[in-house]
Image (cartoon, rainbow, N blue to C red):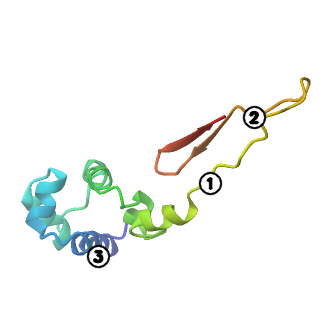
Protein backbone atom coordinates (compact mmCIF):
# COMPACT_ATOMS: atom_id res chain seq x y z
CA UNK A 1 0.00 0.00 0.00
CA UNK A 2 1.27 3.46 -0.89
CA UNK A 3 2.01 5.76 2.04
CA UNK A 4 0.32 9.05 1.11
CA UNK A 5 2.70 11.35 2.98
CA UNK A 6 5.82 9.67 1.58
CA UNK A 7 4.28 9.59 -1.90
CA UNK A 8 3.62 13.34 -1.84
CA UNK A 9 7.19 13.89 -0.64
CA UNK A 10 8.47 11.97 -3.68
CA UNK A 11 6.21 13.96 -6.04
CA UNK A 12 7.60 17.17 -4.53
CA UNK A 13 11.10 15.82 -5.05
CA UNK A 14 10.34 15.26 -8.76
CA UNK A 15 8.86 18.76 -9.02
CA UNK A 16 11.90 20.33 -7.33
CA UNK A 17 14.33 18.33 -9.46
CA UNK A 18 12.64 19.54 -12.66
CA UNK A 19 12.09 23.05 -11.21
CA UNK A 20 8.32 22.92 -11.69
CA UNK A 21 5.54 24.47 -9.66
CA UNK A 22 2.47 22.37 -8.92
CA UNK A 23 0.62 24.13 -11.76
CA UNK A 24 3.35 23.52 -14.31
CA UNK A 25 3.74 19.92 -13.13
CA UNK A 26 -0.01 19.35 -13.65
CA UNK A 27 0.15 20.88 -17.13
CA UNK A 28 3.21 18.81 -18.04
CA UNK A 29 1.63 15.46 -17.08
CA UNK A 30 -1.78 16.42 -18.46
CA UNK A 31 -4.00 16.54 -15.36
CA UNK A 32 -6.08 19.27 -13.81
CA UNK A 33 -4.25 21.58 -11.47
CA UNK A 34 -6.74 20.79 -8.73
CA UNK A 35 -5.77 17.10 -8.95
CA UNK A 36 -2.19 17.94 -7.98
CA UNK A 37 -3.38 20.20 -5.20
CA UNK A 38 -5.67 17.51 -3.77
CA UNK A 39 -2.98 14.83 -3.90
CA UNK A 40 -0.31 17.06 -2.37
CA UNK A 41 -2.66 18.08 0.43
CA UNK A 42 -3.57 14.45 1.15
CA UNK A 43 -7.23 14.95 0.28
CA UNK A 44 -7.12 12.45 -2.60
CA UNK A 45 -5.02 9.38 -3.30
CA UNK A 46 -3.31 9.05 -6.68
CA UNK A 47 -4.90 6.86 -9.31
CA UNK A 48 -2.93 4.41 -11.43
CA UNK A 49 -3.54 6.69 -14.41
CA UNK A 50 -2.02 9.61 -12.49
CA UNK A 51 1.07 7.57 -11.56
CA UNK A 52 1.53 6.34 -15.14
CA UNK A 53 1.27 9.90 -16.46
CA UNK A 54 4.15 10.88 -14.19
CA UNK A 55 6.37 7.94 -15.18
CA UNK A 56 5.55 8.32 -18.88
CA UNK A 57 6.26 12.06 -18.87
CA UNK A 58 9.38 11.92 -16.72
CA UNK A 59 11.55 9.06 -17.93
CA UNK A 60 13.89 9.53 -14.96
CA UNK A 61 11.15 8.54 -12.47
CA UNK A 62 11.09 4.86 -11.61
CA UNK A 63 7.59 3.60 -10.81
CA UNK A 64 8.84 1.48 -7.89
CA UNK A 65 10.60 4.47 -6.39
CA UNK A 66 7.53 6.67 -6.87
CA UNK A 67 5.17 4.15 -5.26
CA UNK A 68 7.21 2.85 -2.34
CA UNK A 69 10.54 4.68 -2.24
CA UNK A 70 12.60 1.66 -3.33
CA UNK A 71 15.15 2.34 -5.98
CA UNK A 72 16.69 5.62 -7.00
CA UNK A 73 15.71 8.97 -8.40
CA UNK A 74 16.66 10.01 -10.99
CA UNK A 75 16.94 6.55 -12.47
CA UNK A 76 18.97 7.62 -15.53
CA UNK A 77 22.03 8.16 -13.33
CA UNK A 78 21.84 4.52 -12.19
CA UNK A 79 21.19 3.14 -15.68
CA UNK A 80 24.26 4.91 -17.05
CA UNK A 81 26.45 3.09 -14.57
CA UNK A 82 25.01 -0.31 -15.45
CA UNK A 83 24.58 -0.05 -19.21
CA UNK A 84 26.12 -3.23 -20.59
CA UNK A 85 29.04 -3.03 -22.96
CA UNK A 86 28.82 -5.37 -25.93
CA UNK A 87 31.27 -8.25 -25.71
CA UNK A 88 33.15 -8.96 -28.93
CA UNK A 89 32.20 -12.36 -30.32
CA UNK A 90 34.76 -14.47 -32.12
CA UNK A 91 33.84 -14.32 -35.81
CA UNK A 92 35.47 -17.59 -36.89
CA UNK A 93 33.77 -20.63 -35.42
CA UNK A 94 34.11 -24.29 -36.24
CA UNK A 95 31.28 -25.61 -38.42
CA UNK A 96 29.70 -27.86 -35.77
CA UNK A 97 29.76 -25.35 -32.89
CA UNK A 98 26.86 -23.14 -31.90
CA UNK A 99 27.45 -19.41 -32.02
CA UNK A 100 25.69 -16.44 -30.49
CA UNK A 101 23.57 -14.54 -32.98
CA UNK A 102 21.71 -12.11 -30.75
CA UNK A 103 21.63 -10.96 -27.12
CA UNK A 104 18.59 -9.12 -25.73
CA UNK A 105 18.72 -7.31 -22.38
CA UNK A 106 15.37 -6.45 -20.78
CA UNK A 107 15.17 -3.61 -18.24
CA UNK A 108 12.61 -3.35 -15.45
CA UNK A 109 11.15 -0.17 -16.97
CA UNK A 110 9.91 -2.15 -19.99
CA UNK A 111 12.69 -1.10 -22.37
CA UNK A 112 15.27 -3.37 -23.93
CA UNK A 113 18.52 -3.34 -25.87
CA UNK A 114 19.43 -5.79 -28.58
CA UNK A 115 22.93 -6.74 -29.66
CA UNK A 116 23.14 -8.54 -33.02
CA UNK A 117 26.27 -10.18 -34.35
Name the spot of residue 80 as percent of width and height, x first. 49, 63
Front disc: 3 or 1: 1
**Circle 1: element type:** loop
Nearer-the-camera pick, 100 or 2: 100
Which residue is pictured at 38% across the width and 68% down the height?
Answer: 74
In the rendered image, the residue lying farthest to the top is 95
Front disc: 3 or 2: 2
Earlier-in-chain disc, 3 versus 1 = 3
Instruction: Give the answer, above or below, for where 58 lies relative to 113.
Output: below
Could you say which quadrant of the image residue 100 lies in?
top right
Q: Is residue 108 left or right of residue 56?
A: right
**Circle 2: element type:** loop
Which residue is pictured at 28% across the width and 74% down the height?
Answer: 13
Q: Is residue 35 left or right of residue 54?
A: left
Residue under label 1: 85
Residue under label 2: 100
Q: Which image quarter is the N terminus in?
A: bottom left
Name the spot of residue 14 as percent of width and height, x first. 27, 69
Specify whether residue 1 is in view.
Answer: no
Nearer-the-camera pick, 61 or 78: 78
**Circle 3: element type:** helix
Q: Which mark is residue 9?
A: 3
Earlier-in-chain disc, 2 versus 1 = 1
- Whole-angstrom CA distance, mark 3 to mark 2, is 46 Å
Label 1 environment density (alpha carbons within 10 Å; few <14, some 14–19, many ≥20)? few
Amino acid sequence: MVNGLEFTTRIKEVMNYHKLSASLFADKIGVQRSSISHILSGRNKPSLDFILKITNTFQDVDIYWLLNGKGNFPKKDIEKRFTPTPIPVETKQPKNQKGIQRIVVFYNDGTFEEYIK
